[in-house]
Image (cartoon, rainbow, N blue to C red):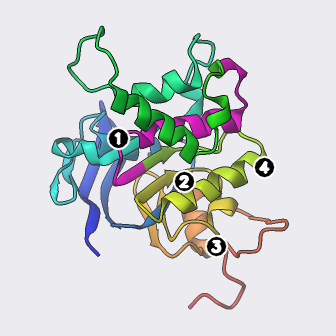
Amino acid sequence: MGRAIHIDNLSVYYGETAAITDVCLDVNEGEFLGVIGPNGGGKSTFLKAILGLIPITTGSIQIYNQEARKNLTAIGYVPQFATMDRRFPISAFEVVLTGRLKAGLSPFMKYSKEDKEIAYEQIKRVGIESLANRQISELSGGEFQRLLIARALTVNPKILLLDEPTASVDASSREQIYALLENLNKEMTIVLVTHDLLAISSTVGRLACLNGKLVYHGEPELNEHIVNQLYGCPVDLIAHGVPHRVLKSHGEEK
């Protein structure tokens, strides 16, 4: 199994302020990586650096052994729900179709028959084909999030990056989204940024914990020392009805 993403000594500064420093991380092909950490810990910066949306200060990022900015076609991206204006008068199908736009094309370009077929195929793939002609303002939070995933899938990505995909959805929609991502992971590498520690602990294959720097990278089972280091203070995690341990039981840590 090869490396999908290789990050070496990555640092990103905004002016004089460090967002992330000296991050070294490999994501293997077919892996499902969860990225967690506090607000301001650098999670979104981490994704934006991979996507080439912000300049990196030091270090390097490779996608399938190529410089990241030369291989961005391998990546599908699902941005934060909160950054989207759902009042814009556009249908669900039209939103997904915009995923087929290519850089440098005229604003008057026409979508091909293939573009439209791919867009509808991805709407079906995420289970919202009955909503294709609905205005996006009429969609629930969970439906809209699946719409954004469908849009990212129109480029046929090898890697899917998601920024807080369950932050604005109810519990039922959250479960549906994680089930969808588990299914997609059979065909592509997934990197998921989230605050939803308890839910992803039973979904992801590995965890990366960011708080300005990489605090932990490994199995999705943490000990109290790592969690306290990640959040900068003692943290109690109480899971009700979650059949997976996030923290090791007392006495398990070596």
Look at the image and say whether residue 158 sits in the magenta stretch.
yes
- Answer with the quarter of the image where residue 109 lies: top left
Secondary structure under badge 1? loop
- Tell me where residue 129 appears, x and y as whole percent: 62, 36
**Rendered image: mark on residue 189:** none
Name the mark nearer the viewer: 1 or 2: 1
Q: Which residue is mark 1?
A: 155
Q: Specify few, some or many for label 2: CA neighbours under 10 Å numbering under 14, 14-19, or 20 or more.
A: many
Name the mark nearer the viewer: 3 or 4: 4
Q: For the residues marked 4 and 2, what is the alpha-carbon distance in whole angstroms?
A: 24 Å
Q: Which residue is mark 2?
A: 37
Q: Measuring 72% from the left and 84% from the top, which residue is drawn there?
A: 249
Q: Specify few, some or many for label 1: CA neighbours under 10 Å numbering under 14, 14-19, or 20 or more.
A: many
Q: Measuring 64% from the left and 50% from the top, which residue is drawn there?
A: 177
Q: Which residue is mark 3?
A: 224
- Kind of residue at badge 1: Val
- Tell me where residue 146 appears, x and y as whole percent: 60, 40
Q: For the residues marked 3 and 4, what is the alpha-carbon distance in whole angstroms?
A: 29 Å
Name the mark nearer the viewer: 4 or 2: 4
Q: Where, quadrant-wise, is the N terminus in this rendering? A: bottom left
Q: Is residue 21 above or below residue 56?
A: below
- Kind of residue at badge 4: Ser
- Numbered range of the magenta stretch: 137-160
Q: Which residue is mark 4?
A: 172
Q: Where, quadrant-wise, is the C terminus in this rendering? A: bottom right
Q: Is residue 245 above or below residue 145?
A: below
Q: Let me know if residue 39 appears in the view.
A: yes
